[in-house]
Amino acid sequence: MISDIIIKIINLPLFRTRKARMARKQKARDWERIQCLIRKLDTARQQLRIYKEFWDYSPDAFLLISCPDGAILDANPAACSLYGYQHEVVTSLNLADISAEHASTRAVWANRLTYIPIRLHRNSDGRKILISATVSYFIDQDRMVAACIIRPIIKRRSTDGVIDDVDFGTG
């Protein structure tokens, strides 16, 4: 008996109209939320594109290094070129593999130095490269990461105008 009355009330034209209006309002609110999320996603894509262009086209060498173990997490194309490795190889290396001064390099992480005025690194063929580095630190997923900007210090011009890194020998 009561259920029959409820069904009759729900089927009244006034109730159906109000229910439909509420449903349209809810759909409009949902659509606004979707549009807001789409705008946020577009903004994030734009920021990622700008970051990627900065990373890929900068003439300075950038390395992201895990401080606890010295693993190279990422390297930009300029860093790959400076060290003479493909990206996949660079990201499989440890900082000890490219540093020619292991004890001094470990001291950089231990003391959280932010500017290294002079340091010797090694490229893929074993030649030493004199570099300067600026380092900033941040935490990513509970791991301390060092963001390094590395610049070769001394370059020489050969008689044909080609710029080469100064060779400090392989020893």
Image (cartoon, rainbow, N blue to C red):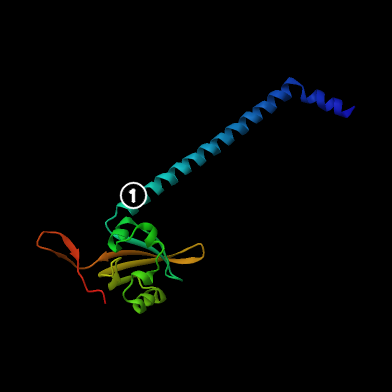
Is 76 placed above or below 116 here?
above
Is 60 placed above or below 107 here?
above
**Residue 93: which quarter of the image?**
bottom left
Name the spot of residue 14 as percent of width and height, x first.
72, 22
Left or right placement of residue 107 versus residue 129 in this view: right
Which residue is pictured at 37% across the width and 50% down the height? 52
Secondary-structure class at tag 1: helix
Which residue is pictured at 88% across the width and 29% down the height? 2
**Residue 96: which quarter of the image?**
bottom left
The quadrant in which the N terminus is found is top right
Left or right placement of residue 31 versus residue 68 in this view: right
* Local crowd size for mark 1, using a 10 Å CA cut-off: few (<14), some (14–19), many (≥20): few
Out of 45 and 90, give the one closest to the viewer.
90
The quadrant in which the C terminus is found is bottom left
Which residue corresponds to mark 1?
Answer: 53
Which residue is pictured at 73% across the width and 25% down the height? 15
Name the spot of residue 151 as percent of width and height, x first.
27, 64
**Residue 90: which quarter of the image?**
bottom left
